[in-house]
Image (tube, coloured by chain):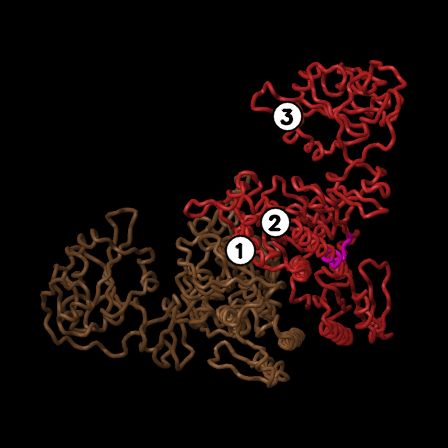
Chain colours: A red, B brown
Amino acid sequence: MRASRFFISTLKEAPSDAEIVSHKLMMRAGMIKRLGAGIYTYMPMGLRVIRKVEAIVREEMNRAGGIELLMPVVQPAELWQETGRWNKMGAELMRVKDRHGRDFAIQPTSEEVVTDVARTELRSYKQLPVNFYHIQTKFRDERRPRFGLMRGREFTMKDAYSFDRDMDGLRKSYQAMYDAYVRIFTRFGLEFRAVAADNGAIGGSGSHEFHVIAATGEDALVYCPTSDYAANMEAAEALPVDSARAAAREELKKTPTPGKSKCEAVAELLGLPLSRTVKSIVLAVDNEDPAKKEIWLLLLRGDHELNEVKASKIPGLGTYRFANEGEIVEWFGTTPGYLGPIGTKKPVKVVADRTVANMADFVCGANDVDFHYTGANWGRDLPEPQVADIRNVVEGDASPDGKGVLAIQRGIEVGHVFQLGTTYSESMKATYLDEAGKPQPLVMGCYGIGVTRILGAAIEQNFDERGIIWPTAIAPFQVVLCPMGYDRSEAVKAEIDKLYAQLSEAGVDVVLDDRGERPGAMFADWELIGVPHRIVVGDRGLKDGNVEYQGRRDTEATQVPLADALAFIKGKLAS
Amino acid sequence: MRASRFFISTLKEAPSDAEIVSHKLMMRAGMIKRLGAGIYTYMPMGLRVIRKVEAIVREEMNRAGGIELLMPVVQPAELWQETGRWNKMGAELMRVKDRHGRDFAIQPTSEEVVTDVARTELRSYKQLPVNFYHIQTKFRDERRPRFGLMRGREFTMKDAYSFDRDMDGLRKSYQAMYDAYVRIFTRFGLEFRAVAADNGAIGGSGSHEFHVIAATGEDALVYCPTSDYAANMEAAEALPVDSARAAAREELKKTPTPGKSKCEAVAELLGLPLSRTVKSIVLAVDNEDPAKKEIWLLLLRGDHELNEVKASKIPGLGTYRFANEGEIVEWFGTTPGYLGPIGTKKPVKVVADRTVANMADFVCGANDVDFHYTGANWGRDLPEPQVADIRNVVEGDASPDGKGVLAIQRGIEVGHVFQLGTTYSESMKATYLDEAGKPQPLVMGCYGIGVTRILGAAIEQNFDERGIIWPTAIAPFQVVLCPMGYDRSEAVKAEIDKLYAQLSEAGVDVVLDDRGERPGAMFADWELIGVPHRIVVGDRGLKDGNVEYQGRRDTEATQVPLADALAFIKGKLAS
């Protein structure tokens, strides 16, 4: 590509609504252009990256046996009503009426449509397994679209759906997708991690998320550096404490803690480590009969955090909400900050985190403003509690596989593989006939990759103060040729044109900057855009028969004999 | 591709709602699957054709200097309000509100969005010309979606938009697109014709349609076999009659024509050719003041047809409608079937077609039920009329370029190139700075290709009683290999696997039917699907060292030595 025949538009400053680095850099590099909240035009430079991402996804999906089709953006509400998602999805589902008043959804995913395809097309066990996928425009009406392509409303997603005769088949299809995802993210050239995710009803290893590692990631990933264990924070189990609970040594004592409503302040006042305190979290579970409303008290060690997903799995807490101050006063007789499990005003259900259940001589609120108890002990001062894992793990916790201790890093979710089972096929009556001619529900899996989100995640992982640093596989161009005086020096023009022709011939995705920009502006543009390899051709170097190579991460340029330039670049691209 | 790893689903019968052959065959061949009215899932077999069409379009657009980007499907109403299309487009524009109640359009085209891109990105004459295009999902809420992909609601379109500094530049950009379209449709392997189209305000040669020729086409294409002249019916001029009007020879005579309200019946009754009769068409032009409503009488030769677009261009008729019976009775004192230009009850504006103005001794309604005039003559029996070209041309009319006579064929519109001028840039204030630093409106062109419609059009042109006959360039597979007993004969398996590997290696898009179907069913499938080249490998042929080749249009198979098969197929694909 000659730059003069392409469209390059860079900005010195990012618009003020761009909050994170990938959004800023994509705007500055002219990769995207905002059309509305969470809606972007993919400009020519950005589209090149998207197409490379799509091509890799497509190749690996095909290699893994996926069959591409294309399902519509506008989908009849009837199908969404069959699965109940028409109501369940709420405001995120963009809904539209046609000229006859019929309801349609703008697809956020395509489970319903693909299941409809399957129930008419997959009639016999002989046709299974099948994996249909498409790469298509999606719309999700986010409440707060932000971060550019990271949380947009219109986006491109690859979604695949596998159909098997039983769980065994599903597990094979799932593993094939998992392996394909590993190949895909490896080919992207991104540092990533697959983590076990919470998958609600199905349990087991039925769901994994693929995350691009980035310090700015929204998600905490838990892993064990000395084993294969990896899970997202929601799913990472905090094991019970290994040792037996210590015996009580202190007396229960109501201690004044005036104005100290936080565990940190109480611990400081008392000269105790934070890990000796217990914090109280009050949840409410509503009932149609208001008299049957339940109030639950969840207890966590002062330095731990509640894991809301784990809490929601405790029988009875499936639909909890946080209690309001009025409820706290009514049930505990005190305001938040001083409440605790001992001597509540009305009965509450107490759940202690595994760690808390193992504590002795702990500090907790005394249900009296400006007072805490010290020396509290289970079985003596209060009944043994219901025990559950309700906290987020922390660095240094034992790995659930028993093979080391946990570490935590940040990630950006870009892929998800999920064992759906028969949820959709049962609600939509999607069955196949088995060997005995008996209808059986299709067993499904679904597998997504956020194609446009990959761009944001790749940048969050790969940038510096000058701009983006694309991995070669998904860079808009692999190599940029920068002439020093393309219009002034015949030698420069002749040699760089020749090199351009050679590289193009060799199948290298190269751009020749023939725009006539001054060197400073030209270099700044391509560093901002993030092309990974740069060759500069100038009269000075040519005198010695050299051109100048600089990788986007290199701090210095390398002189390369002109005659070796092609081989040199090929070597760089191969490595 | 091995058929066992692909998804093939054929039907013996087309669903009853499929009216035209391309729709029936696409459904039977498993290329598309209906999701809702005018909304289809592109099944794997159909998607392969779409991708080939897209690839050719993309290559030729890039070659012509087009720059690909991707504009969103969901577009803010504000832009559509700027150009007034939000109101003008009516029910065809699918409208949707987001969770905050803001209005959006599901794009039917992208003039507004691309003009918005241009007004911020194209600031200087130095950046011009630019041609942005995208290949994207469109939605048009047709009142009566039908004919499968021919008149769907959701469809894929390539739309390109050129930006120039002046009309001269636009004409060059336009010609480049015209030339690219000729290359594109030639590469598709379709018989097509570019015809001048009516382009409303701009005039001149500012609009052409590209039609795939098919007997079942909705549009009539007018062309001159002995020159380059070609236009669609709306735009094809009917020249004035070459000879002077004959002198009056008959007397005006009110003749009884009881029950004969049609020209054909009157001509038959009177023993005259239809071309001696004149038919009357009554139009109304409403006015805010009902007293100022105008009634117009348009006169056409009995064997000619009104061209509604031409009529709408007569000054004063821009907003005409057909008059109703009440109006006809009020103005003519008679019911339809017997009205005419002589002796109307209230004054009407008379427009005679050029042919009618040249007639003498003609027959027309007498404004009296069951009576016509014969021997009517201009200037004598009624005033000389306003004359205009208001009819459709017919075969044998003189070509407007004076180089022969016109012929007519049917076509399916699949592409359109259009000189927009400054309509959009002026309403959206999209300007660039010229050399003097003065803002000037960008001069625009737009260029569409109905990507998914191409499939329907290609089939309407290329089918037989057995199914589709794809041109090789856009066939889902170029070659199908059919083994006689893949699972039974080791020799067949070995040889066909080898041939499959050789063809794949050579870059041929080949499918090996390893499904184990019986020969009859297998051949029927591939003939229905329309793969243009078939090789059959069986033990009988192998004994003589032969395989069997049959082109999809061939009536008989050809024996080809196995050793020559690769070269033979390559030769077929090259020709």
- Residue denoted by label 1: A123
How many C-alpha atoms fall within 10 Å of the one at disc 1: few (<14), some, or many (≥20)? some
Residue position marked by numbered label 3 in the rendering: A285
- Left or right: residue A93 compared with residue A280: left
Of badges 1 and 3, nearer the viewer stands: 1
Q: Label 2 vs label 3: CA separation?
A: 34 Å
Tell me whether marks 2 and 3 sit on the same chain. Answer: yes
Residue on which disc 2 sits: A443
Please say whether residue B560 is one of the residues in the magenta stretch: no
The residue drawn where x is 9% and y is 65% is B256
Q: Amino acid at mark 1?
A: Arg
Is residue A186 one of those drawn in magenta? yes
| Closer-to-camera residue (A353/A6) | A353
- Which quadrant of the figure has residue A485? bottom right
Q: Earlier in the sequence, mark 1 or mark 3?
A: 1
State yes or no: discs 2 and 3 in contact (Cβ < 8 Å): no
* Foreground of the two, B139 or B500: B500
Of residues A312 and A260, the one drawn nearer to the viewer in this rendering: A312
Give above or below for A112 relative to A121. Answer: above
Task: Residue B209: give x, y in percent of width and height.
Answer: 45, 68
Question: Which quadrant of the figure has residue B223?
Answer: bottom left
Residues drawn in magenta: A183-191
